[in-house]
Image: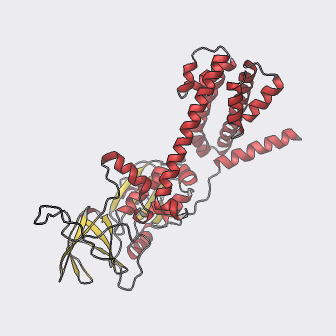
Amino acid sequence: MNKKVLIMLVFIAAFAFILPQAGAISWKNNLDDALKAAKSQGKPVMIDIYTDWCGWCKKLDSDTYSDPKVNAASEKFICVKVNAEKEPAIASKYGVSGYPTIIFLDSNGSVLQKNPGFLPPAPFLENMNKILSTMPKPTAKIDDKPPVEAGGFAVIDDRAGKKGKDGKLLPAKTVGQEFVYNGYIESGKGGLTAQINYKGVTYFVKKGDNFAQFQVLSVDKEKAVLSSDKGEITLEYKKPYDKIGFMNEISNAITQPAETRSAVDRVEIEESFPAFAAGKMRGTILAATFAIILIFYIYYALCLQLIAGKTKTMNGWMAWVPVLNIFLVLNIAWVKYRLLIVPVITFFALILIAPFAAAFNPIAGLVFAAAIFLNSVYFILLMAYVWYKVAVARGRSRALAVVLSVLMFISPLNIVALGYLAFSK
């Protein structure tokens, strides 16, 4: 009876592994309808050109489109699926020669980007993010409420950077809280669009446009210059860190306020608590996580080197080198390398072959998924056996060695067990 239950659990897990998950993306099946909707709603279009026999198309459905972040970002698009065999004219129009091919269009139907082949969720989301960042938004009306992304920029007048009669730099003078300059949007051939919040109303304007009592004289990636009956006003981005180059990019990525992030980035952090979304707490958490990982790695390497020394195992220095430290553990346990290397190669081979097998034959896919599951179970049993042998090599009884090998899989008791093997006599 227990054997039957085990077999059933294995096949249930394998089936769940290969079963495509239902995505929450709202797909249209007619490109013309999608283009009309994009035009009326001012949204970009995402076209998935696929075929029924394409294995990578199915993997895109099951792995990428089922991702919650991709689903959330898709709400910013008009999404349409096109079967290339049923609508070859569309595939020919966009020069599609392989499947799947994802094509992004602007709201007017012009091609923004074409991505052939499968992409996992993270890079696919990054592409969606890039498309959204290039899309200009419609001009806000006077009675519209300010959007959630308002804020994050300082407003200064044209004295900034200029010197007075005494030769000293004039301080930047705040224009007032009625202005908040939020940034710019690149819109392809249309140039840059400035996003300006004035007295609670957000405007999306370009050079030469008029809004309220102002005319836009210029827009670039540093500032927007406005003209009014009181003279010129410069709205300039205020950089929060005095760093340059690569380090500046890292700082901004960690600490940039949620208000100045792109639409897709906000999808990822809107559900977080405010301090984390604001950036500073996020940076602290990342730094603390890195420090904890580093401390644990040093502790692990030190313990492993001490265990190697006490078991008379050569090349204890391998404890400090990633990957090599795994072979040092095998040396301490007197376990042959092939017991690890062969299953590792087999595991990656199964991972690569399984999607193709599932696409052409569901039963074959099920068999491969079961094999991957059993391979994973083997790894767990192998590592338990390895740590059992390490404990025996340290002179511990078989019963205590079994307990220690189990504790190595329980955090944070594994830290205690590793320390016991390293520091005890």
Q: Residue at x 63, y 43 (%)?
A: 361
Name the residue at the front extreme. 166
**Looking at the picture, how far across and down is residue 220, in whole percent?**
23, 63
Left or right? Give the position of 408 relative to 253: right
- Quarter of the image where the C terminus is located: top right
Q: Residue at x 31, y 53 (%)?
A: 242
- Decide which of 189, 251 is in the foreground and name it: 251
Q: Considering only vertical position in the picture, is 80 above or below 117? A: below
- Quarter of the image where the N terminus is located: top right
Q: Residue at x 34, y 55 (%)?
A: 241
- Decide which of 143, 17 is in the foreground and name it: 143
**Looking at the picture, how far across and down is residue 22, in whole percent?**
61, 59
Instruction: Inspect this view and state whether residue 82 appears.
Output: yes
Q: Considering only vertical position in the picture, is 12 above or below 314? A: below
Instruction: Inspect this view and state whether residue 88 appears.
Output: no
- Decide which of 245, 19 is in the foreground and name it: 245
Q: Considering only vertical position in the picture, is 124 above or below 3? A: below
Name the residue at the bottom extreme. 143
